[in-house]
Amino acid sequence: MTDTTLTPSRLWKRMTLDQRQRAAHAFWQEPEAADDQAQAALLIAQQKKFRAKTVISLDVDRKARHLASLASLPENIAARALIVYHLAEQRPMMGAFLDALGIAHENGLIKEDSAKPDAAQLAPAARKISTQFPAGDVRLYFDTLRCQDPETWGALP
């Protein structure tokens, strides 16, 4: 029997190269991701037969290209890359989706005291933002939400 649970690593594998490059770029620019960045540098060094010191010294664009070229990432690095990518590049879409759900947010981030979404509103809200934003970006956002919190977002179409 095959496990088909959606995980950040499996989602990374399904992303387009362009999506992975944008996510990797956001990942390397995130100041709070130092531990994950060090782990990613070691992974790149191992995969590309570089010294870790060489990878660490590369500019952001080159590190992003190397990370994006890796088809497989550990769960923690893939999860961090997905989160920082959405925070860096997809806030308008995140905000539009939360607005469509009637969930209080601040620039696309759910306020802590906000209620969970009404399952009946998920499909209409999803359809609404699907007409406003590129389908690949919407799909990646929904898949990321399902990975992070399947209990809350599992009913997304």
Image (tube, rainbow, N blue to C red):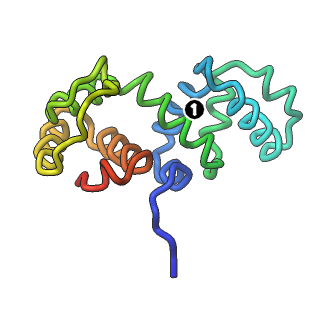
The answer to whether 94 appears left or right of 84 in the picture is left
Name which quarter of the figure residue 112 lies in: top left
Badge 1 is on which residue? Answer: 24
- The structure residue drawn at horizontal position 31% and vertical position 24%, both measured from the top left corner, is 111
> Could you tell me residue 147's position as x and y percent?
43, 50
- The structure residue drawn at horizontal position 58% and vertical position 21%, both measured from the top left corner, is 30
Q: Residue furthest front?
A: 113
Q: Depth check: 4 or 140 in front? A: 4
The answer to whether 4 appears left or right of 24 in the picture is left
Q: Depth check: 117 or 3 in front? A: 117
The answer to whether 107 appears left or right of 22 in the picture is left
The answer to whether 114 appears left or right of 71 in the picture is left
- The structure residue drawn at horizontal position 18% and vertical position 36%, both measured from the top left corner, is 129
Instruction: Judge whether 100 appears above or below 3 on screen.
Output: above
Name which quarter of the figure residue 38 lies in: top right
> Could you tell me residue 120's position as x and y percent?
11, 50
| Element type at mark 1 | helix
> Could you tell me residue 61's position as x and y percent?
63, 23
- The structure residue drawn at horizontal position 69% and vertical position 24%, both measured from the top left corner, is 34
> Could you tell me residue 83's position as x and y percent?
48, 33
Q: Amino acid at mark 1?
A: Ala
User: How many discs appear?
Assistant: 1
Quarter of the C terminus within the rendering: bottom left
Q: Depth check: 18 or 40 in front? A: 40
Specify few, some or many for label 1: CA neighbours under 10 Å numbering under 14, 14-19, or 20 or more.
Answer: many
Name which quarter of the figure residue 102 lies in: top left
